[in-house]
Amino acid sequence: MSLLEWMLGMRPRPPHGARVRRVMAGRLVVITGASRGIGAECARRFAAAGARVVLIARSTQALEVIAQQIRDRGGEAHAIRLDLRDRDAVEHAARALIAEHGPPAVVVSNAGHSIHRTLAQYADRGHDAERLFGVNALGPVALMRVLIPAMQRGGGGSVVAVSSVSAVVPAAGWSVYGASKAAADAWFAAVAQEIAPEVTVSLVRLPLVRTEMIAPTPAYARSAAMRPVDAAGLIARAIVTRRRTYGPWWLSPVAALLALWPTALDRLLASHESRTVRR
């Protein structure tokens, strides 16, 4: 662990395993984007705590690898191949999940997609924006429109929406990604008021996480980043505490600064963006 990563809050302390087990043991936990990275770490951690996990992602083969790892360790795991951009398929899969397994106690809405492109680069590529909004916003809404009412009827539960600091701090090259995450944040935050206290919603806004999603941007190989295992620990803490929002310590001060001085970070972010493009 580097000193910078520690100072930036990228190595949060996970909750004690006994606390996680008290919340998870014997309960149904649904995790989207579970075939790799943060979702896979969550699946393994929660299954080890006694949860019955349902893993959702687009890759059947990768999903089955994670599910089999869990079964080999004595856990219970079920895999559902699903593309969140296909909203009819999402609703059908959600209803089938409830019919087969019952309403979930916990849903981790983790699936996400990222593209680093400036407006000039995607001006003639409308499908880039549609794809990101489909995976990051419209798909999760379609899934939760079915699962949340079932959770309410089943006695309640908790939802963790895995988001990004990009939803709060705009940066050149991440306009569509940040906008899609901000849209999902707004939806979850508003719905949280409607479904409490039976179902609680926690927004977990993560900084840069070292997953396959950032691999296409070479400059990030040298950047400070959170590890998937640390992100999974933070998600576990959100489930245990049911706190409304989580994020690195510096996010709220930066958001307040931007509210008072919208151009405060323009020069810094533009400089970082130009270095990223050159590299």
Image: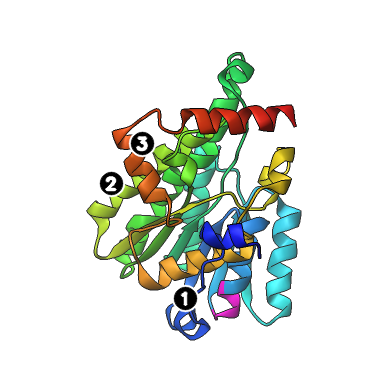
State the quadrant of the C terminus: top right
Can you identify the residue that label 3 sits on? 258
The amino acid type of the residue labelled 1 equals Arg
Foreground of the two, 180 or 266: 266
Please identify the quarter of the rendering in which residue 271 is found: top right
From the viewer's perspective, tell me whether residue 82 is left or right of residue 20. Answer: right
The amino acid type of the residue labelled 2 equals Ala
Q: Which is more N-terminal, label 1 or label 3? A: 1
In the image, residue 79 sits, relative to residue 270, either above or below, namely below
Which dot, 3 or 2, sits closer to the camera?
Answer: 3
Foreground of the two, 140 or 232: 232
Foreground of the two, 265 or 58: 265
Can you identify the residue that label 1 sits on? 27
From the viewer's perspective, tell me whether residue 206 is left or right of residue 279. Answer: left
- Report crowding for label 3: few under 14, some 14 to 19, many 20 or more residues within 10 A (C-alpha): some
Which stretch did the figure color magenta?
Answer: 46-50
